[in-house]
Image (spheres, rainbow, N blue to C red):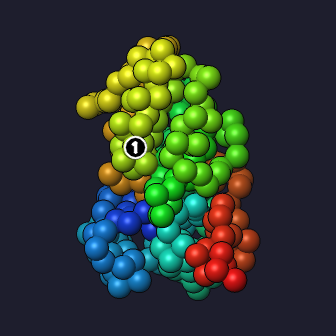
Amino acid sequence: MSEPLILSVETATLAGSIALSRGSQVLATRVGKPEVSHSNTLLSEIDEILSGQALSVQNIDLFAVASGPGSFTGLRIGIATVKALATTLDRFCIGIPTLEAIAYSAGVSNATVALLPAGRGEVFVQMFSISDEAVTALDQAQHLSPTRAINKYIGRAGIRWAGDGARLYSRLIDESSRNAGYRFMVADNEILDSPSDAWIITLPATTLAEHVGSLAATRAREGLAQTAHNLKAIYVRPSDAEMKV
């Protein structure tokens, strides 16, 4: 049986991205513009990435989407779009936690911490172990200040730090690692053999959607695809409107 043709959507981050893949093979990717709302561009970008491969949305076998945490508005746009397409075309879909995709993008590791800016100077954070096809959560996703997020892992050497939040707070990670007696490194390319005592900030994924698609392909092979009705967002924290109530 051939691998499914997967359309992956990531609107959890400011720019967002779209990927088209067949199983683990990425056919095309597209990165959005951080200054433009996903609501204004997502459908046209989906049409463009498909037409570039001489395909239409009817050819898609499986829809995948970054299910959060991330931008509340972005998540709702991405998930609503995928749910609508999957329902209209009678296709299955798969939600991939954003922090899981971020950690997976950083490569194989015993300990990878995914950091994603959460607004108001805070971050979403979670630690994973990563093999070639499996991502295992080592704790729960949390919404914390950068200092609390980093201090949470101060007793563990050999961490890969992944995501936009890791780059944004690299100086704080550097300072914390040195205070703890760990080596500190910032990757300018893929690191295959990470020193066991180092804290390493990895290259951020430019098209996170392709990693969403890769994880979705693995889940599909495991029979974990779901209906649009069961696709839910992972918010981790209340929205600003809810916190004001």
Callout 1 crowding tier (Cα within 10 Å): few <14, some 14–19, many ≥20: some
- Residue at point 59%, 51% (across, down): 144
Q: Quadrant of the C terminus?
A: bottom right
Which amino acid does the dot numbered 1 rest on?
Tyr
- Residue at point 46%, 58% (across, down): 121
Residue 210 seen from this side: no
Residue that carries the numbered disc 1 in the rendered image = 169
Residue 20: image location, x then y, percent: 40, 61
Q: Is residue 210 above or below residue 202?
A: below
Residue 146: image location, x then y, percent: 50, 46
Q: Is residue 168 above or below residue 7?
A: above
Query: Is 98 on the left-hand or right-hand side of 32?
Result: right
- Residue at point 66%, 61% (across, down): 236
Per the image, label 1 sits on a secondary structure element best described as loop
Query: Is 153 on the left-hand or right-hand side of 46?
Result: right
- Residue at point 28%, 69% (across, down): 33
Residue 89: image location, x then y, percent: 57, 81
Tally of numbered tags: 1
Residue 203: image location, x then y, percent: 34, 38
- Of 2 and 14, nearer the camera is 14
Residue 220 seen from this side: yes
Q: Is residue 6 above or below residue 50?
A: above
